[in-house]
Amino acid sequence: MTAAAEIDLDGVSKWFARTETREEFRAVDGLSLAIARGEMVALLGKTGCGKSTTFNLIAGLIAPSQGSVRVQGLDPFAKFDALRGKIAVVFQSDRLLPWRSAIGNVELGLEMLDRPAKERHDLAQHWLERLGLAGHEHDFPHALSGGMRQRVSIARALATDASILLCDEPFSALDEITGQRLREDFAALVRENHKTAVFITHSINEALQLGDRVIVMTRPARIAYDVQLETERRSAGDDAIRVRIQEILAA
């Protein structure tokens, strides 16, 4: 494992069998990637470039066909239970349970971690307040706006105190203004609480707003551009970074 890496992929490939032709579809090809503790990394690329497969490999939902994946030194697929509570996921849709109130939905992850009832309630209340939902604790999902529901989803992830947040286009379904505000709040909370975050996006603006580091991927998932934004901004600026990303995505 790469020194100081929280997430480490070493020569990872992933292919899937096509049942109709018995051929193999290669989604990830020889990917090596190390993410340090506390980094916010945007995985950026066009639809179908293998971002989601890479995400699923890190989350331990699938195993690599070749190479190794390590999260905090463990194989996330083989040691899925050992990483329970250390990884939290925020999806594109809020995935709230309609029969649970906002606070009940935030408590769900804590229930799965067998936290005591009072601790669950107090943590859920705390994170709902931090995400601007004080007064909406007992509202059910149907009574909340899309942005509010996604805030509940983020509160649910943060309440578990997982050290790693994996985010699969969590703001893409929101309108521009709501998404902008929620991205700002999310980034501030991640940095304030010293989390490692990996988020998938197809938006250059979102990647530049959220990431400390942007990794542009091409199909099958390979790294075409890996940029530390703070360093590159000092020498080139956002416009040059944006042009480089656009050139890669247009190729």
Image (spheres, grey):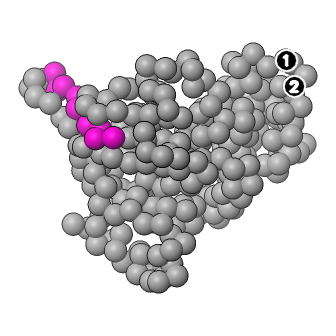
Query: Measuring 45% from the left and 61% from the top, which residue is drawn there?
Result: 214
Please rate how many residues cluster around mark 1, counting C-alpha atoms within 10 Å: few if below 14, some from 14 to 19, many from 20.
few
Q: Residue furthest front?
A: 3
Residue name at image x 44 percent, y 83 percent: 236
Which residue occupies the foreground of this view, 20 or 7? 7
Which of the numbered marks, if any, corresponds to residue 116?
Answer: 1
Report if the CB atoms under discs 1 and 2 are less than 8 Å apart. yes
Q: Quadrant of residue 158?
A: top right
Residue 198 visible, this angle: no
Q: Which residues are magenta?
A: 10-19
* Vertical comparison of 127 with 66: above or below: below
Q: Position of residue 42 (x, y in %)?
A: 48, 55
Give the crowd class for mark 2: few <14, some 14-19, many >=20 residues within 10 Å. Answer: few
Q: Position of residue 104 (x, y in %)?
A: 79, 26
Place of residue 86 in the rendered image (x, y in percent of width and height, measured from the top left): 62, 31
Give the Cα separation between the discs numbered 1 and 2: 5 Å
Residue 233 is labelled as none
Q: Is residue 2 visible?
A: yes
Residue 107 lies, with reference to residue 244, above or below; the image says above
- For badge 1, the amino acid type reads Pro
Disc 2 target residue = 119
Q: Overall secondary structure of the magenta stretch?
A: strand
Q: Nearer the viewer, residue 121 or 141?
A: 121
Residue 120 position in % (x across, y down): 83, 25
Is 132 left or right of 19, judged from the image as shown?
right
The verdict on residue 11 being magenta is: yes
Amino acid type assigned to the residue bearing label 2 in the image:
Glu
Secondary structure beneath dot 2 equals: helix
